[in-house]
């Protein structure tokens, strides 16, 4: 009887379908990936996906895939698994790797120590170039992951310098490593925050940065591959916070419905309570509204303009702080710039608002005999509200950073809510001044 072998699945095909597959379907599909490309596909998965895949495999296959991972990647997989499975995953590693992983687990996930790979190419300063190249070949056969640079260490593992592979191969064979190495090496410490590490990679276009302790002993290496995932996670977290919710700790479809409600309901309740102050402010000006109903027509226009300008400003400053384009000491320069920007933007919007009211009055006689004063009230209020929105939106991230909070918590909805209440006060105060003796 003729049997049919299942057709192989190519990695790019499986990658497209991967998010829609169940765990069992992923395992079965992964088995159909050709052996020559299966390793690369597996390494391209996120740590939670790798953990899910390994735990769904028969016990005999788990060891192969766990031992394919570099120590820093193995840490991520172990931490991504449920606590009940972590010891079992550690048990699949060889003794040396397991010790390295346990050391890395002692560091916080968002620090350089938690990102680093303890395996790197090292040479001694007194070696000749020929000896260094031979030693480099020996190390690369022992599963050293990154060979962009060779790091020059003394007998006590202090970092003395760095030499690129190109420099090694171009140098005369009898020269010593210390004669060609570069001594000014950019480093980070074990507790350097991952965002700071990411900024160093972006600012210096490096492929790897060594991690050293307080005595400048080299502990490991953070590579650009490691930091790409960090940058994505940090950007995702900031965007979610700016959107007015708690950051998700898993992909969208991996978060339970109840978990999603918890992440979103808290901020919505805070914003809802804040918006109640808008109703309170409206109640305070109830008499003015009753005497000049036309003022109520422009309330949405006023408060939305202030909220929009505040949201723009806070988004710009949050991102600038995250990229270190702006620092805490720059608050005064930012404030001056944003006040001018707010005045300019408010003048533009105010001009458009005045023109709209006067044109409608000329065409349809909508606003009565005091249309010009109403137009001026709206125009002046827009200048004030937009300037205030821009100022408060730009300063709030500085205040939060100074207090030790994440500036991304100054979400656009939060700023908009704050400006809504204050915008009403500005609007009706301007109306009381300009319309006294006429409509009020």
Image (tube, rainbow, N blue to C red):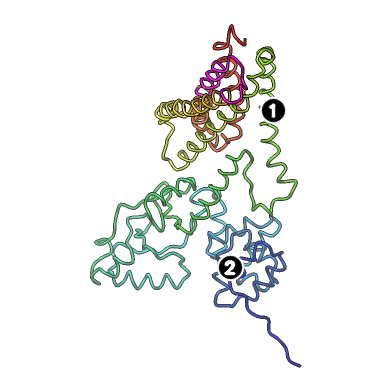
Q: Is residue 305 above or below residue 54?
A: above
Where is residue 237 shown, x and y percent of the image? Answer: 57, 45
Taking the image as shown, residue 73 lies to the left or right of residue 126, namely: right
Q: Is residue 99 above or below residue 29?
A: above
Where is residue 415 shown, x and y percent of the image? Answer: 58, 31
Element at label 1? helix
Identify the residue at horizontal 33%, vertical 66% (top origin): 165
Where is residue 340 shown, x and y percent of the image? Answer: 42, 26
Label at residue 42: 2
Q: Where on the picture, by quarter, is residue 426?
A: top right
Taking the image as shown, residue 293 lies to the left or right of residue 95, namely: right
Q: Quadrant of the C terminus?
A: top right
Mark 1 or 2: the one toward you:
1
Identify the residue at horizontal 25%, vertical 72% (top origin): 173
Where is residue 264 shown, x and y percent of the image? Answer: 68, 40
Q: Main secondary structure of the magenta part?
A: helix
Q: What residue is pinned by disc 1?
A: 273
Q: Is residue 169 above or below residue 378?
A: below
Is residue 369 magenta-colored? yes
Taking the image as shown, residue 415 lies to the left or right of residue 223, namely: right
Q: CA distance from mark 1 to mark 2?
A: 47 Å
Q: Where on the picture, by quarter, is residue 124?
A: bottom left
Q: Is residue 274 above or below residue 170?
A: above
How busy is the neighbourhood of tag 1: few (under 14 within 10 Å), some, or many (20 plus)? few
Of residues 345 and 402, the one drawn nearer to the viewer in this rendering: 345
Q: Tell me which segment is drawn in magenta.
A: 362-383
The answer to whether the residue labelled 1 contacts the one labelled 2, judged by CB atoms less than 8 Å apart, is: no
In the image as oriented, which residue stretches furthest toward the top? 437
Tally of numbered discs: 2
């Amino acid at each position: 009887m003729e049997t049919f072998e299942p057709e192989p699945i190519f990695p790019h095909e499986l990658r497209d379908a991967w998010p829609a597959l169940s765990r069992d379907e992923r395992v079965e599909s992964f088995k159909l990936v050709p052996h020559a490309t299966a390793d690369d596909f597996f390494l391209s998965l996120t740590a939670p996906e790798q953990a899910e895949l390994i735990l769904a495999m028969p016990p005999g296959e788990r060891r192969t895939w766990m031992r394919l991972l570099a120590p820093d990647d193995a840490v991520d997989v172990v931490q991504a698994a449920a606590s009940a499975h972590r010891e079992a995953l550690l048990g699949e590693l060889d003794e040396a790797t397991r010790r390295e992983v346990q050391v890395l687990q002692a560091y916080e996930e968002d620090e350089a120590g938690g990102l680093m790979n303890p395996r790197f190419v090292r040479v001694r300063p007194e070696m000749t170039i020929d000896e260094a190249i031979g030693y480099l070949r020996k190390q690369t056969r022992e599963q050293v992951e990154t060979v962009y640079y060779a790091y020059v260490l003394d007998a006590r593992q202090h970092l003395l310098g760095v030499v690129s592979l190109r420099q090694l191969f171009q140098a005369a064979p009898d020269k010593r490593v210390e004669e060609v190495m570069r001594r000014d090496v950019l480093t980070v410490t074990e507790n350097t925050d991952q965002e700071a590490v990411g900024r160093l990679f972006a600012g210096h276009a490096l492929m790897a940065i060594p991690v050293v302790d307080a005595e400048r002993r080299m502990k490991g290496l953070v590579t650009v591959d490691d930091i790409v995932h960090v940058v994505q996670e940090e950007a995702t977290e900031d965007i979610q916070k700016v959107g007015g919710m708690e950051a998700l700790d898993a992909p969208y479809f991996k978060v339970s419905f109840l978990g999603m409600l918890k992440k979103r309901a808290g901020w919505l309740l805070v914003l809802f309570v804040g918006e109640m102050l808008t109703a309170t402010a409206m109640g305070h000006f109830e008499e003015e509204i009753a005497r000049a109903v036309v003022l109520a027509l422009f309330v949405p226009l006023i408060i939305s303009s202030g909220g929009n300008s505040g949201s723009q400003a806070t988004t710009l400053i949050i991102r600038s702080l995250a990229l270190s384009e702006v620092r805490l000491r720059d608050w005064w320069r930012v404030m001056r710039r944003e006040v001018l920007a707010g005045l300019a933007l408010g003048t533009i919007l105010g001009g458009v608002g005045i023109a709209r009211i006067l044109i409608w009055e000329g065409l349809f006689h909508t606003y009565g005999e005091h249309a010009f004063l109403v137009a001026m009230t709206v125009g002046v209020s827009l200048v004030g509200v937009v300037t205030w929105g821009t100022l408060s939106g730009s300063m709030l991230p500085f205040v939060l950073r100074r207090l030790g909070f994440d500036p991304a918590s100054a979400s656009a909805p939060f700023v908009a809510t704050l400006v809504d209440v204050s915008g009403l006060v500005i609007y009706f105060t301007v109306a009381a001044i300009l319309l006294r003796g006429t409509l009020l």
